[in-house]
Image: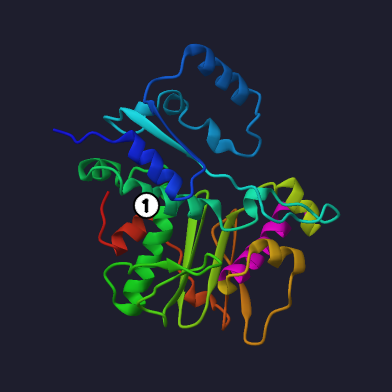
Amino acid sequence: METKINSKALKAEALRLGFSACGIAPAEPIDQAHQNALKMWLDANRQAGMTYMANHFDKRCDPALLVEGTRCVVSVALNYYPATRIPDEEYQFAWYAYGKDYHDLMREKLAALTACLPPERRGRLAGQLPWQQAEVLWAYGLLLALLRDRCGWREIPSMDRTDSGKPFFPGHPQVYFSISHTEGAAAAAVADAPVGVDIQRIQTPPRHLARLTGLEEPELFFESWVQWEARAKRTGTGILDMVRHRPPLAPGEVCTAIAAFPGYAAAAAGAETVLPEQVRRLSGADLLGRLDIWA
């Protein structure tokens, strides 16, 4: 017999965690009129470069198809209105990009919110929450493979984040790491000094970022962007500050472009140059084999 969820307690906990709103609805298909409207919106390419929004149309119309046995959907909202805005005369960034990466922020809060669910329902959700997409899992799989080779660890230790959002291992302050993931690929790095890594699929850059950087050609844009991102991850500096000010390399800081897979750009920032022989490229099957995981 399943334990019932106290909806009032769940909503109250969501607000306590910092969400702006929380609602619960039955996991039922949307009506035909809304399905037709969504299809017309997608057919008109209103999603622009966010092509993933056209994937899994049936599941977008019926949330019960996402996870077998789903009976209700919990929706949360988080207000990202900034306390301080960029002056109007400067290049503008979307408000949600001002602070911590909202993927990380929402992930942490949602993970905390699931603790309110009965144990049997938390187990049902394990491995199937929306943010746990393939690229994220590959990134952490790569990190685990590196930690096994370098440190002999069989699992990833507990993580925490600095005030700026940079992840670290509280129990192992001498081990530094960084992960990155993009559509179809992931990257990870482990070092004895602060390190940052970034990988991006080369595509048409967002218009406002192309204007800000002065780089409209996709390859040139992303070859530069991954270096800025890697340096920002290494220092814990916001990517906005890094791109706007583009500070020179600090003494002892090195940023290396990495030959990634075709169609991707990657870079690593650290205390020493990344040599070609230090870079390992793995397919998903190769990684599963290294971790002794078989799908």
Q: Which residue is mark 1?
A: 112
The one of 186 and 99 positioned closer to us in this rendering: 99
Residue 20 at x, y percent in the picture = 52, 42
The one of 6 and 152 positioned closer to us in this rendering: 6
Q: Up-down: is 277 above or below 158?
A: below
Residue 227 belongs to magenta span: yes
Answer with the quarter of the image where residue 65 lies.
top left
Residue 12 lies left or right of residue 234; in this view the side is left
Residue 295 at x, y percent in the picture = 27, 48
Which quadrant is the N terminus positioned in? Answer: top left
**Magenta segment range?**
215-233
Seen at 22% across and 45% down, the residue is: 119
Q: Can residue 292 be seen in the rendering of this structure?
A: yes
Circle 1: element type: helix
Q: Up-down: is 254 above or below 245?
A: below
Residue 95 at x, y percent in the picture = 67, 49
Seen at 70% across and 65% down, the residue is: 241
Three-letter amino acid code at disc 1?
Answer: Ala
The one of 289 and 30 positioned closer to us in this rendering: 30
Residue 61 at x, y percent in the picture = 45, 23
Q: Can residue 216 be seen in the rendering of this structure?
A: no
Seen at 81% across and 56% down, the residue is: 87
